């Protein structure tokens, strides 16, 4: 069967969305459970946000867990102290992550390469220690508890996303689709092409008239809004926000997902997150050293498939 | 008013004086060649004009406007475009995409998340026009990184043309090229100058190219301005011959 490139692309896209839509029905027979699928979506969105910078702007942030965690705390604190509204908590979480990213990003974007990564780690750890120490607000080491996601109230009817995991899955899928849609839209815009220009050749981008630092800052800020949104969903998923969600090791996990899945592809990080989350879920019930196996898998992928799992699949299908 | 007016610029790196007190005027529609032996400071001079770094002393005026303090991207916006001695392109993108990015930036769309159908069609038309001028239309959908060296050099010029510049700065356009490629790129630059009236400053080592193209020639030697004049005057200049042959004048 021979299809031209656009047709193949639409077919692949339809396949991805179909698989995601039907996940609550095909996962349980394969030994999964719905909340696992929800986790994949949320962490997948977080990894895609990291990749928005890493794969499409060419800058590596090793501190994105901070904005993920801020999104989670923002949502949790909103539900606990402000109002019992799921949409409001998502909005506040996203804003907290995004605004913090905009402010710190302005200080970070002048650095490049390793220095950029180091500064992002440093700022990330600042937030980790704040969440860890400020027990009266954040619950400290125990994490933020005492809140739960609220049913969606549409006036005439309401959807119970709290006690029905399948309904919550579809709610998260809806949010994921929204965020992924916006992300894809930006990447296909003239601004998105300037991001790719910066990734490909910063000097050339500059001499095409692109103020490189400003564009990296915008990309960084957008990415923090996306990951703040993912973090807020993560808090709703667990009804809990954990200071370890801000730790740089969490940033590392997200980078692993993006690189393992394929950082030059839009959907790669979602695949990476799926592999990571499923491996974690399965292996952690077998051994406490599950991370060594994930690490081994990561090393193998980087050594033999430097373009990531999806990069390989795509290359095969094009050949 | 000159298109480009460089006034007494000096650039030092620590104790090294790379460019020393050079003044230089380029008129609208002129094609100027900058030549000089290796290490004469030609590329540093280009970097000062294009805003790669600021001069230690002196001023750069572009269309009468002082641009000395402006960063590179702001000078591009005013109409200055350049190429590099070592080709700077987007290797993993197609020729068309390489040209499209510059075209969109020049159209003022760089921060846009959305373009209308008519805007997109106009961008496509301009990209096709640029590709045709550069003679790359047949290779438009190939990855730039997979093209022959000569075509990559031409693609970089096409990217500069996409900016619709008032001043085109070409740093050794024929670097690393064979005879045929050199001939073709020389013809391209000649067309840009004669037919499209671009104001061009180019650094070049190949004297056949220089004498074939240039209206006037500026000679740098050890960071200083050694001579300036028509090709005939430069060819007859004893100091220039001495600098190139390495003899004391």
Image (tube, rainbow, N blue to C red):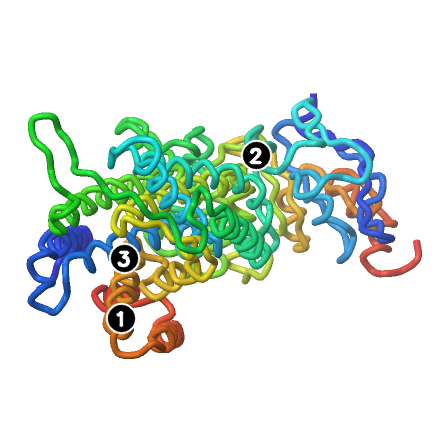
Q: Are marks 2 and 3 on the same chain?
A: no
Horizontal and vertical percent for residue A286? Answer: 26, 78
Q: Earlier in the sequence, mark 3 or mark 1?
A: 3
What residue would you read off at disc 3? A270
**Secondary structure of residue under mark 2:** helix
Q: Residue visible at 7% across and 31% down?
A: A157
Answer with left or right where residue A235 lies relative to residue B183: left
Answer with left or right where residue A36 lies relative to residue B18: left
Q: Nearer the viewer, mark 2 or mark 1?
A: 1
The answer to which image quadrant residue B23 occupies is top right
Chain identity of mark 2: B
Q: Which mark is residue B69?
A: none
Horizontal and vertical percent for residue A117? Answer: 53, 56
Q: Residue visible at 52% across and 42% down?
A: A105
Badge 2: how crowded within 10 Å, few (<14), some, or many (20+)? many
Horizontal and vertical percent for residue A167? Answer: 12, 46
| C-alpha gap between disc 3 and disc 1 | 14 Å
Q: Which mark is residue B76?
A: 2
| Relative height, residue B107 to residue A111 (above, below) | above
Asked if labels 3 and 2 touch by Cβ distance under 8 angstroms, the answer is no
Answer with left or right where residue A177 lies relative to residue A155: right
Badge 3: how crowded within 10 Å, few (<14), some, or many (20+)? many
Q: Are marks 3 and 1 on the same chain?
A: yes
| Relative height, residue B198 to residue A184 (above, below) | above
Q: Which mark is residue A279?
A: 1
């Amino acid at each position: 069967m021979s299809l031209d490139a656009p047709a193949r692309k639409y077919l692949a896209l339809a396949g991805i969305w179909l698989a995601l839509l039907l996940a609550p029905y095909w996962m349980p027979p394969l030994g999964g459970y719905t909340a696992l699928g929800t986790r994949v979506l949320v962490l997948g969105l977080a990894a895609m946000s990291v990749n928005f910078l890493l794969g499409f702007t060419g800058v590596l942030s090793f501190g994105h867990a901070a904005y993920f965690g801020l999104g989670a705390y923002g949502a949790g604190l909103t539900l606990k102290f402000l109002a019992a509204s799921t949409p409001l908590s998502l909005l506040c979480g996203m804003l907290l992550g995004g605004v913090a990213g905009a402010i710190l990003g302005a200080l970070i974007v002048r650095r490049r390469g390793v220095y950029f990564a180091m500064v992002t780690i440093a700022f990330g750890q600042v937030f980790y220690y704040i969440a860890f120490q400020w027990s009266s607000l954040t619950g400290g080491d125990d994490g933020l508890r005492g809140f739960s996601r609220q049913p969606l109230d549409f006036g005439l009817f309401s959807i119970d996303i709290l006690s029905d995991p399948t309904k919550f899955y579809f709610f998260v899928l809806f949010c994921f689709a929204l965020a992924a849609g916006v992300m894809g839209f930006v990447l296909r815009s003239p601004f998105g092409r300037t991001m790719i220009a910066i990734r490909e050749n910063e000097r050339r981008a500059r001499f095409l008239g692109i103020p490189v630092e400003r564009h990296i800052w915008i990309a960084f800020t957008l990415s923090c809004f996306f990951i703040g949104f993912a973090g807020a969903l993560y808090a709703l998923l667990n009804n809990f926000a954990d200071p370890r969600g801000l730790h740089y090791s969490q940033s590392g996990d997200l980078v692993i997902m993006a690189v393992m899945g394929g950082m030059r592809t839009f959907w790669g990080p979602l695949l990476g997150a799926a592999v990571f989350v499923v491996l974690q879920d399965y292996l952690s019930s077998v051994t406490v050293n599950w991370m060594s196996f994930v690490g081994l898998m990561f090393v193998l992928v980087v050594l033999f498939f430097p373009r990531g799992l999806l990069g390989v699949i795509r290359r095969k299908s094009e050949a | 008013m000159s298109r480009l007016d460089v006034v007494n610029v000096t650039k030092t790196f620590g104790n090294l004086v790379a460019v020393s007190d050079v003044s230089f005027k380029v008129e609208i529609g002129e094609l100027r060649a900058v030549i000089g032996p290796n290490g004469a400071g030609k590329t540093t001079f280009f970097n000062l004009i294009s805003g790669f770094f600021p001069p230690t002393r002196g001023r750069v005026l572009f269309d009468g406007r002082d641009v000395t303090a402006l960063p590179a991207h702001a000078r591009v916006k005013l109409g200055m475009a350049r190429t590099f001695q070592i080709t700077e392109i987007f290797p993993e993108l197609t020729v068309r995409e390489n040209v499209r990015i510059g075209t969109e930036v020049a159209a003022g769309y760089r921060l846009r998340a959305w373009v209308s159908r008519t805007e997109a069609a106009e961008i496509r038309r301009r990209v096709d026009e640029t590709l045709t001028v550069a003679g790359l239309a047949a290779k438009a959908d190939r990855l730039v990184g997979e093209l022959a060296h000569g075509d990559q050099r031409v693609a970089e010029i096409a990217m500069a043309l996409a900016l619709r510049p008032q001043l085109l700065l070409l740093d050794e356009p024929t670097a690393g090229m064979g005879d045929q490629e050199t001939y073709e790129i020389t013809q391209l630059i000649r067309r840009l100058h004669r037919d499209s009236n671009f104001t061009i400053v180019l650094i070049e080592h190949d004297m056949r190219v220089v004498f074939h193209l240039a209206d006037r020639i500026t000679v740098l030697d050890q960071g200083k301005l050694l001579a300036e004049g028509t090709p005939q005057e430069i060819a007859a200049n004893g100091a220039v011959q001495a600098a190139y042959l390495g003899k004391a004048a």
